[in-house]
Structures are given as structure tokens and as C-alpha cells.
Amino acid sequence: MSKPVNQFRWPEEVPVAPLFRRGRPTSLSERAERVSAARTEVEARGETFYQGPSGVHLASFPPKERWDDWVDLDSRAWPRREEHHYMLVPTTCFNCESACGLLAYVDRDDLHVRKFEGNPEHPGSRGRNCAKGPATLNQVTDPDRILYPLRRVGERGSGQWERVSWDEALDAIAARLRKAIVEERQNEIMVHLGRPGEDGYTEKVLASWGVDGHNSHTNVCSSGGRTGYQFWMGADRPSPDHANAKVIYLISSHLETGHYFNPHAQRITDARANGAKLIVLDTRLSNTATHADWWLSPQPGSEGAINLAVAQHIIATGRYDREFVRKWWNWQEYLEACRPDLPVTFEAFEGELATLYAEFTFDYAAQESGIDAATLAEMAETVAQAGTRFSSHAWRSAAASNLGGWQITRTLILISALLGSIGTEGGLFANAWNKFVPKPIHTRRTRGSGRS
Ligand code: SF4
């Protein structure tokens, strides 16, 4: 490839990072002035200025108008000013399922990826990544990565393999699967994959084969937490609007710690800057807990009891969203099935609701969790005041590896369902509400499996 012609002169005319090239600013107001000056310069050239959400940082992303031919100086050549030309190609990090945006810096001379940086155009990560994002380069250049299909030719464990074509690999695998299906031995097929992030597509394919042997990392990870969500809303993950919440309630040590759910962490930071209160239930002082207004360290597995006490407080003080409950809860069915002696009226249900949850007092939760009742009462009052701007999230941690851990998520959504903070600004959304999700699967009964 011939070296492209530079569209500008470096660095006199086009400052790439004017904030930092001119010396270290000494105060926030000085930084703000420099950001403002940088914006003026960049926009005067008809280019996009990427303002970091903090207001004073991350203002040095390359303008997208120059992504086809971005020029960086080679830091290793310093003090010589050695230019390198790159194509900046948007791509996605999949070191976790947050799937943040990245820009691949592709060297125009040899088309090798030299580095990854954040993509300011990505709506989720907005240019900011955890450390694993840029480190993705290791995976691209790892000499041990598998580049083509391999077939074992020696004894299992002997490490002897031969290269085969994709056609050979697919034909061999498909033939064995087909034979098992034709012979109605579907229960001998099991598919395992790392982390399914496609909302049921694989299950749908497997169901079409009559196969229900699907295993993944999720089984020993977040399945407990997901089950509680699934039972309430038919979607196994929440997508809370943390950015607009008044109160954010997190049950998990890792959730917004930074190595995972980076886009969520950004929104929580934004919300806190706007005055939102952060409540963290976590047995350890996690990074997230260090930012909390309320850090509660309960006995592991007692989080559900705390959730029930919060729910009881909301019910007992009449702070629930009556219209939401009347419209969306199956209160008529409940009364008909469980209290046929009562009239099928919403008022009768409200009385029953208060009776049902009366036992879950702060004293009860204190006994279960080891956190004193007065602290729980203060925290619950904060939640009650959030109204429809109550966002929450429980994932692994508390809901995993506990008998009945899924009830922690279930009792958590109960709070949102009482406050009416579902599908609201600052509330809880199902992750599947704004994307394609196949209908639930139905596998047919397979011979000998005893299952359907
Ligand atoms: S949070 Fe980190 S590891 Fe996960 S997708 Fe984003 S950059 Fe990659």
C-alpha cells in the first residue's frame, strides 16, 4: 500500500490533544477553559469534538472525520517526531458481555492492528473502557491462539492434532449430530458454550433438533439471579436506568466495580453527580461499596429478608404506587385462588397485602442479616422516597451458590413493582424490551429421556 498523503501538517496546525500538550492545568476552571478552547479549535475545522462526561477529561479522542487517516507520533521514537498513519476501525470488546466499543488502530503501512482505544461514538461505553478493553490486543497477537480447525489424531491428551478445512470440520460434526437425531438419540447431544449472549437463539436451534442439553458458564454463575428476574418479567436480565435514578440499590460485589458492567458504572457515576443515593448490599467493602451512601454488609444469603422488610415498610406506610399495582398485578387471580372468602376488590387485596407482609419487620430483617433495625429503617425510608426513580440490580454474588438465592432477585423486583418503578425514567427495564428475543422454547419429548 502506498503511503497516504497527509491531509494536514503535524503538529503546528492540528493539535491532537491540546489539553495535555500545553502543560498540566492547575485547577478545574483552568481545565474547563482549555476544554472550551479545544472545542473551538476542533469545531472550527468542521470536526467532531468529543467531550468527556466529566466535563474536563477525555477530550482528546480523534475526531471521526479523520478516522480514515489518523496520524499519531511514535512514542518510542521520542524525541524524534516520527509519524504513523492509522485507519481507526470501530469494533467491539468481548472480554466480558458488556460489549464496549473499541477503535482498532490499523497501521496503514502493513494493516496490522497496533492498539485498541475506546470508541467515543459507542452509545454504551462512550469511549471509556476498563483495562481489559485495550488489552484485547494480546488476544489478536497471542501466538497460541487457534487460527483454523484442528482434528485430534493421537490418543486423547497426547496433544497430537492435524489441520483440517472448515468444510471437513463442519461435515464431520454435522454428520455425527444428524446421525444421533435421525436415530432419536437427541439426549446424547449436549452443547456447551462459554457465555450465551444471544437471548435464546441457540436454545431455539437446539429445540428445532429436539435437543435440550444446553450448558454454559451461566449455570454456575448468574442463573440464580436471572431466575428471579425471569419469573417476574419473562426476561432474565435487568437494564436499569441508573443515570436518571434517585436511588440506586445494588446487591452484588462486582456489579459496578469496574472490570465488568463498565457502561452501568458510568451511569451510576453520572447519577451520583446529580444527587442520586447509592445503596450497596455487600459482605465486603468492594470498590462499589466505597462509593455508597449506604453500605450494608449483611449475613450472606439474608439479602432477601432485607428486601422484604423494605417492601413491608413501603406497604405499611402506604407509599406504593396504587395505580401501578392495580393495573399490573394479578390481584384478582390471587384473591380468587387464595382468598375466595374475600370480595374481589382492590381494597380487599390491599388489606390482604398488608397482612401478608406484616411479619417482615425491620426487627425480623435485623435478626436475619445482623444489621441493626434502625439502620435498615433509615435505608428503607430512602428507598420509599425514590418513587418511580428507583433502579436496582442483583447479579451473581448474593444470588449465586445459595439455596434459594434466586429469591433475592425476586424480592428485589417486588420493591420496584410496589414503587411502580418499572419501565419508568430512572427505573427498571427488562433487557429484552428493546431488542429481538425469540419466543420461549418448547422441546418435544425424546425417546428415553423421560423429559419434554
Ligand atoms: S467492561 Fe471492559 S472487558 Fe467488558 S466489554 Fe467493556 S472494555 Fe471489554
Image (spheres, grey):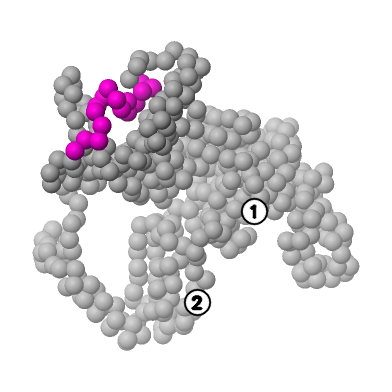
What label does residue 25 carry, if any? none
| Residue 305 visible in the snapshot | no
Identify the residue at image location x=31%, y=41%. 67
Residue 442: image location, x then y, percent: 50, 77
Q: Please state which amino acid type lies under the numbered disc 1.
A: Gly
Residue 55: image location, x then y, percent: 50, 27
Quickly name the residue at label 2: 442
Circle 1 sits in a helix, a strand or a loop, which is it?
loop
Residue 16: image location, x then y, percent: 32, 28
Q: Which residues are magenta?
A: 5-20
Quickly name the residue at label 1: 423
Identify the residue at image location x=62%, y=50%. 428
Number of residues whose C-alpha sits closer than 10 Å to that of mark 2, classed few (under 14), some (14–19) or many (20 or more): few
**On the rendered structure, is 107 left or right of 98?**
left
**On the rendered structure, is 101 left or right of 244?**
left
Residue 383: image location, x then y, percent: 70, 40
Q: Please state which amino acid type lies under the numbered disc 2.
A: His
Inspect the magenta stretch and tell me whether residue 11 lies in it.
yes
Circle 2 sits in a helix, a strand or a loop, which is it?
loop
Which badge, 1 or 2, comes first in the chain's sequence? Answer: 1
Number of residues whose C-alpha sits closer than 10 Å to that of mark 1, classed few (under 14), some (14–19) or many (20 or more): some
Identify the residue at image location x=33%, y=47%. 90
Please identify, in this view, whether the residue under mark 1 or under mark 2 is nearer the observer: 1
Residue toward you, 278 or 67 = 67
